Amino acid sequence: MCRTINLTSLYLSKTSIRKGANGQISQQSERIRAYFGALELSRDFDWIRLRASLLYASGDRNPYDGKATGYDAVLERPLIAGAETSYWMHQSMPLGGGPALSMRNGVLASLRTSREHGQSNFVNPGLRLAGIGADLDVTPRLRLIGNLNYLTFDDMAVLAALRNQTFRSKTIGTDISFGLHYRPALTQNVCSTPRSRRCCRDRD
């Protein structure tokens, strides 16, 4: 029996020179060259779908060299690696004064003050994500969702400059989440998705 493997992939690059608007950290014009890639494989076994996800957003290696290589987006709405239940993607991550590490309902570690009012910031630590997950269609009305994602920064130079300290590890931690998707009327017009999630930080 032949089973289909589903593949979803995306690759983006950003190259430009930003003049007139200085970088948040370097306070100078920046030459932007940043990259983003995402890949998700899934396979169906009757009522069970297994998923494996990879995501990469380039980080900046030197916040003061006039080269901005950390990837950022204007607006985010991630649909990968169990985004609907993930702790990392659903919570804004404060850094402690100034910009947030990441925005609510976003996956990028963009170090922006605001998604709607702040400009894109291409001097950021970037992100690497590797995850597995499963969707179980128990009934036509009820789906169980589980995800486990391992997250690290791409480069720590920007965070080291902002916090004025040295970091020994790029690891963010492990994001574990579970959820239920209930459609009482068998349509997407009325549905409920309670979730339970936790991000466990790895110790150095």
Image (cartoon, grey):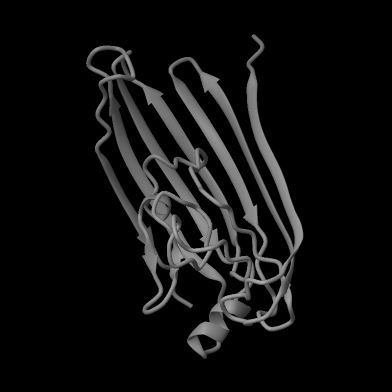
On the image, the x and y values in percent for residue 117 come to 45, 60
Quarter of the image holding residue 17?
bottom right
Left or right, 142 with reference to 107: left
Q: Nearer the viewer, residue 41 or 87?
A: 87
**Splitting the image into 4 quarters, where does residue 100 fall?**
bottom left
Q: Residue at (65%, 67%) from the top-left corner?
A: 59
Q: Can you give x and y, in whole percent of width and height, for residue 3 in the image? A: 63, 16
Position in image of residue 104 (x %, y %): 39, 54
Q: Look at the image and tell me whether residue 167 can be seen.
A: no
* Residue drawn at point x = 76 percent, y = 60 percent: 16
Residue 18 image offset from top left, x and y in percent? 71, 67
**Residue at x 52% of width, y 59% of height:** 151
Vertically, is 40 above or below 65?
above
In the displayed structure, does residue 28 sit left or right of residue 110?
A: right
Instruction: Work out whether 77 lies above or below 69.
Output: above
Q: Residue at x 39, y 47 (%)?
A: 86
Q: Is residue 8 above or below residue 101?
A: above
